[in-house]
Every structure is written in structure tokens, then in C-alpha cells.
Amino acid sequence: MHRIDKENIVRAILLLFSVTAILILSLILIFLFNEGLPLFQKTGITDFLFGDRWIPAENLYGAFPFIVSALLVTLGAMLIAIPLGVSCAVFLAEIAPRWARDLMRPAIELLAGIPSIIYGLFALVVIVDLIRIPFNLANGETILAGSIILAVMVLPIIISISQDSIEAVPRAYREGSYAMGATDWQTINRVVVPAARRGVIAGIILGSGRAAGETMALALVIGNAEKLPMSLLEPGETLTTAILLEMGEAVIGSLHYNALFCLGIIPFTVVLIMSIISSRLIKKGVGRFG
């Protein structure tokens, strides 16, 4: 078989895989909207998004408490993960000796492979008590507990992508900075990190998407209270945990069933948009240094 024929076969296979992935994503999107949109015929989009009462027995479906809980837990996680993740990436890419990078990079990547239920069990046993005792709470299962464990879960994503982006900055940038008399820290702070900011932001966005879609770990530690949380020290229930806890008892084809699919549309759309934005940022960052 000629080399050109092999290349054509490989190209066709890759095209098939790409088309299949797009088709699967499209089918998921169609399925979600097909199952969820009937709710809007009886409950308007505004009432669904901003209603504060979720009572299936009375056919009241307001998702606002779930949306606020999801925003709080994700925001809290990112406030913890962003400084830790970016700092760790800078250390590994610019400061750490080679043996430390070779040791820490596989360990960080291993964190990404741990099942979320394991993180949830760890948080339930350790983090919940660490919150309950200092803050004198009756129960440590709060949004703060969910934010802390989510921060740990998204750290590998932020660190890996940020480190790759920082290491992709051309050596000439650093040499030019040193030639101007800048110190190592000034070069890192004013030249290297700003030059890699697209990739760093892309890693943060991907981490946010990962946090927004998490379910199992949060279901164990967030308290699962169907109410509007007013602080990080209160229990809550996110969009994904509500689906997990209620789908088993929802009658197929019922309004409750449709409402749960509507809950799923929200994080699906958010994660999809974040993934597209991060992919574009990564491509622009690579092209800039290419």
C-alpha cells in the first residue's frame, strides 16, 4: 500500500471520529432540549430561572436556589484554586529544579484521575469537621465544604494547562528581560506570566467548567438543602446534585421529569460555552508563540 493511500485512510478515520463526536454532542443537546422544553409551556423561562420555590408536589419549579448554590460553590472553589494553581504552575515551570518537576508533574496528573466519589468521602470525613468545629456549626456540610473539595479537584487542570503555557513562552523573552537588567522574579512577573496569560486563563475557564459540572463529591458534603443560601457557611443544593437526588423518583414524562432536564440544560450550556472559549484561547496562545 502506498504512503499516500495510508495517509488518506488515516485522514478518513480521524474525520470519522470528529464527525462522530460532533454527532454525539448534537444528539445529547437535542435530547436535553426535547425532554426539558415541555416545562416551559406551563412554566415560563423567567419563572423557572428566577423562581425561588421548588415543590414538585405542587408543580412549582423555581431553579434560582440551585443556580445560586452552584454559583457560590464554583466561585468559592475558584477563589481558592486560582492563586494556588497558578502559583504552583509558575514554580514548576520557572523555579523548581528538574528532579522536582519530574516528581511533581505525575503526582499532579494522578490527582486528576482520582474518582470524584473518593474526593467526596475524604471531604465528608475530614473537611466537614474542619469547618464545623472552628465555626461552631451544627453541621459542617456547607457550601464552603463543597468549595474546598472542588478547589482540590480542579487544581490539576489549572496547574497542567498553566504550566504548559508558561513553558511555551519563547526563551528569547526571558533573555531579553535579563539583558535589560531584570531579576528572575521581575522576568517571571512582568514578562513570562503576562505572555502566557491566554493559556492561564484557558486553564482557569476549563477548571471552572469542571467545577460547575461536578456532582458526586458535592452531593456528599454540600448539605442538599432546597433553599436559597445566603453565605458559604450554609447548606445548599446545586443544579447537578438536584438532578442526582430527584431523578430516581421522577415519573417519566411528568412535569417534574421535564424540570430536571431543564436543570441539566443550564450546566451543559455553561460548560459547553466555557470549553469553546478556553479552546480558542489555547489556540491563540499557541499561534502567538508559533
Image: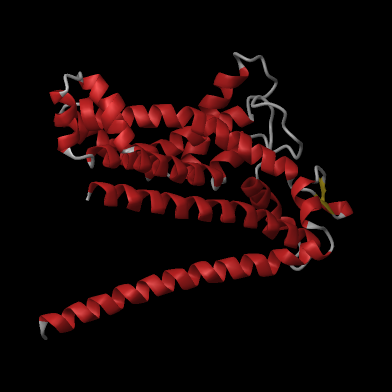
Residue 209 percent location from the top left of the image: 50, 46
Q: Can you tell which quarter of the image residue 201 is in?
A: top left
Name of the residue lying farthest toward the right: 58
Position of 22 relative to 175 (above/below):
below
Specify whether 244 is left or right of 22: right
Position of 47 relative to 169 (above/below):
below
Residue 79 percent location from the top left of the image: 51, 29
Q: Quadrant of the N terminus?
A: bottom left
Which residue is pictured at 45% across the width and 31% down the height? 81
Residue 170 percent location from the top left of the image: 19, 40
Residue 126 visible in this rendered orientation of the protein? yes
Residue 224 percent location from the top left of the image: 69, 38
**Tally of numbered tags:** 0
Which residue is pictured at 26% across the width and 26% down the height? 188
Position of 132 relative to 58 (above/below):
above
Residue closer to the observer: 86 or 219: 86
Name of the residue lying farthest toward the left: 2
Q: Can you tell which quarter of the image residue 173 is in?
A: top left
Residue 122 visible in this rendered orientation of the protein? no
Name of the residue lying farthest toward the bottom: 1
Residue closer to the observer: 163 or 255: 163
Specify whether 172 is left or right of 160: left
